[in-house]
Image (spheres, rainbow, N blue to C red):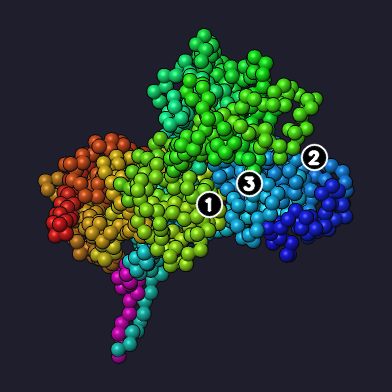
Amino acid sequence: MEERAFAAWSWSVEHCLKEYDVRLDKGLSSYKVEKQREKYGWNELAKEKGKPLWRLVLEQFDDMLVKILLVAAFISFLLAYMHGSESEESGFEAYVEPFVIVLILVLNAIVGVWQETNAEKALEALKEMQCESGKALRDGFLVPDLPARELVPGDIVELQVGDKVPADMRIAALKTSTLRLEQSALTGEAMPVLKGTSPIFQKECELQAKENMVFAGTTVVNGCCVCVVVCTGMDTEIGKIQKQIHEASLEESDAPLKKKLDEFGSRLTTAIGIVCLIVWLINYKNFLSYNMVDGWPANVRFSFEKCTYYFKIAVALAVAAIPEGLPAVITTSLALGTKKMAQKNAIVRKLPSVETLGCTTVICSDKTGTLTTNQMSVAQFFTLGGKTTTSRIFHVKGTTYDPKDGGIVDWTCYNMDANLQVMAEICAVCNDAGIFCDGRLFRATGLPTEAALKVLAEKMGVPDAKMRNKIRDSELVANYLIDRSTVKLGCCEWWIKRSKRVATLEFDRVRKSSSIIVREAAGQNRLLAKGAVESLLERSTHVQLADGSLAPMDEPCRQLLLSRQTEMSSKGLRCLGLAYKEDLGEFSDYYSENHPAHKKLLDPACYCSIESDLVFVGVVGLRDPPRDEVHKAIEDCKGAGIRVMVITGDNKSTAEAICREIKLFSDGEDLRGKSFTGKEFMALSPSQQIETLSNPGGKVFSRAEPRHKQEIVRMLKEMGEIVAMTGDGVNDAPALKLADIGVAMGITGTEVAKEASDMVLADDNFSTIVSAVAEGRSIYNNMKAFIRYMISSNVGEVISIFLTAALGLPECMIPVQLLWVNLVTDGPPATALGFNPPDIGIMRKPPRRSDDALINSWVLFRYLIIGSYVGIATVGIFILWYTRASFMGINLVSDGHTLVELSQLRNWGECSTWSNFTVAPYMVGGGQLITFSNPCDYFTAGKVKAMTLSLSVLVAIEMFNSLNALSEDSSLLTLPPWRNPWLLVAMSVSFGLHCLILYVPFLADIFAVAPLSLNEWFLVILVSVPVILIDEVLKFVGRSQRYRVKEKTA
């Protein structure tokens, strides 16, 4: 449809009306409205069809580790069912393993679905920004409350102060001399934008340049106008943002941690598959036998029961190799991280974001409201001194609308001279703004510049000492009032009471100033004006000196004032000139609309002559100031190797000045290749764009539209950077969604930005991001610690099962025991490792690469050695119990069990063929006697004590091994266990849980274990402790290697 692409801003009002076949005084007819609606639809944002619940649930199982667990659960269930059928028992214990695995997966899926359903609320928040109704002209009649969804292109709509714009519209006529709109949420401009009706002769131009257009979701702050609707629904700028948010959500890539875990899962799958197959094939002789006749196998005998048994061992190995507890521990650790971050004012909405923050390499920050306060404030002002060749400059502290925030530096002018009194009067009286307190934040009503002038008037005070004390007392009383939302501006009120406003000359583009006529207490009228400095200087004939006397404005005086103004502008200040006029001619006695001169006030063309022969008072420099803490945060980012890029909708010179002030750039730094408008950057070739983004140091992109922000974030991600994007406006939402970490402002941020983000800053403080990055790095280090710990434990379990199968021994641990170790006894120490204190120099290291290995080759080698010891110890104690009467002076046969030869133990499957093989019953803790109807049961039901010893050794070794995981390299002598007291508590809990299954009969039956004597516990500890010594030696070797490498590179 060509009409949808109609560039209304580039055509005259007459052409636009002709395009939609509509008259400004009649509006559309009902028939045309229906025809337009058939073509364009309703004026509402489309509701994206969400994923059905069943699909969301299925997606949670699309993960390598989860798939392995599913297969393991299914096979366990089949084997348990077959075992139950054979033995004709209910076999509840056999079903424990598949049941627990499925329970873990269901919980995991519930958490995943909950996160997914919460993730897409940004689009709902956009709908809330839409206007509900508007005043439209239909069939020649004004419909005062027409539902906004019923508007169609071509509708004639009237807008007034405070109205929310219902659609994208072309301004057709102004009903007041000026029209300003607050569109910072959409474009990022700090100031309300002045609008007009003149066409913009550019087919392609940025939103900020479309000064004859008003956009859906923005608000009229000044003036009244009539517009013609040109875009509705999804064709509006806000609709395009919805599309971009949806597209960005489709492009969302996995968090670095998830990528690493998926990669780890894939490798683990391959390793498990190979090892399981080897274990099964090693034992093929036990279930498959044959004789060779003439070089061919004959008399093939196959035992399905034995085949199933060794298949069960292979499944047990798979269960041992999978760290079932890992997803739960990672979730717990991330949840703890979010709690810590919340205490630092960073509210994390998506758990994986905690870890992603740690490897952030680029922070793309919005300027307005993020690096700056988004509150205009006066930074300095100047007036002339005692002569026309001297000037006085006053610096003002404070960056918010709070009158008590800061003050005027070295202010000794409580008995203000005449010149400063006039300045304070103009700031307070020629002003329509107000200030209110919204919880913690002071906000402005009306124009931000005018609110800043009122704050300046409060800081200047009043010349009347008695009144000054009265104002101070009333402010003290206001602190104790229940209603704290209204901010009492005592000084401004004092000035306003002295001067009654009788007329207003509104701002317009031609004269670039606004003024009011006030009646002074003495009865005469006076004109107070403010506006662009150059414009007021042209119409000023005199200048006021400090003592209140007037001097003619000569050229040197004009040049002095202009040079001071240029100096202030170069610092990024927006300069406003202040002036007044006492001889008003025919307006000297103006009092109301009935005055003969009133008709001149109705014609803005007369305003220039009324505002001529002015007396120039001084210049005020305003700005949206940077936050106090940003400078240090930028320094911290540089130290941590994180690049900062500022992407803003504001103009180039302001953005550059702020970036210099926060020390992103040094004062004299050449900004060629570092500062671009969005349009300039997009005009570069792709190779130049990549080169620009790759160059070290800060960057600033001004006049950026939502699509520019998105494109920059996309390019950085394609270059392999981990991007954190900050923002507060609707225009930031698509880029927030696309970035690895979207960071929204909690106080000034729009709901759209918050819902699209991964993290919300409760205090809108840029430096909070830096604290969050440090926390993210610490969490990643701790995560590595518990992943190393869990993997080393699992390697030990795999090696023990592998050794059991390779040596032909009875299985020394059954799957349900391994599951208990992986989930319950490993869980608390692994979680406690998440409380490890952060490294001292964590923010003095460069960010880790997102493709860095979670476990490098040296760490893997270390844990293979540790795992080998775990395997040898668990299998070794099993063999010792069956074959040795004592070990290192500890009596092993006090329970009366029968000893066998190692060869018998290795060939236990042939027990039925042994002659004269008998075994005696033996006693286990609690006075229970283990007896055997068949001597061969000694290697199945009779192995309960040997299995308990193996399981206890595994648990004890893993507890000691958790101490090794405190640090990847540091010895326990330099980093003692009490540095993390939670780990000692967790070890005690794990040992307690292990004792629970040993000494509670019901649990002992489920887990096929028996209570141990004190002597046997002593043996368990003796076999387990060496794991600490082995790792200490390996850590020492690692440190020595690194030291040698450092010496060589040095």
Which residues lie in the magenta part? 278-294
Per the model, the C-alpha gap separating discs 1 and 2 is 35 Å
Residue designated by label 2: 145
Q: Which residue is mark 3?
A: 126
**Residue density around tag 1, few if under 14, some if 14–19, many if 20 or more, within 10 Å:** many
User: Which amino acid is tagged 3?
Assistant: Leu
Asked if residue 290 lies in the magenta stretch, the reply is yes
In which quadrant is the N terminus drawn?
A: bottom right
Distance from label 3 to label 1 (Cα)?
22 Å
Task: Please tell me which residue lies in front, 126 or 581.
Answer: 581
Q: Earlier in the sequence, mark 2 or mark 3?
A: 3
User: Residue extending furthest top?
Assistant: 466
The residue wearing badge 1 is: 703
Image quarter for residue 284?
bottom left
Question: In the picture provided, is 178 more to the left or to the right than 275?
Answer: right
Give me the residue at 29% from left, 63% from top: 802
- Circle 3 SS class: helix
**In front: label 2 or label 3:** 2
Residue nearer the viewer, 495 or 254: 495
Is 678 magenta? The answer is no
The first of marks 1 and 2 along the sequence is 2
Q: Earlier in the sequence, mark 3 or mark 1?
A: 3
Residue 422 percent location from the top left of the image: 55, 23
- Say which amino acid is labelled 1: Arg
Judged by depth in the image, the label closer to the viewer, 1 or 2, is 1
Using the rendered image of the protein, determine whether residue 190 is visible from the camera's viewpoint: yes
Mark 2 residue element: strand
Residue 784 x %, y %: 32, 50
Number of marks drawn: 3
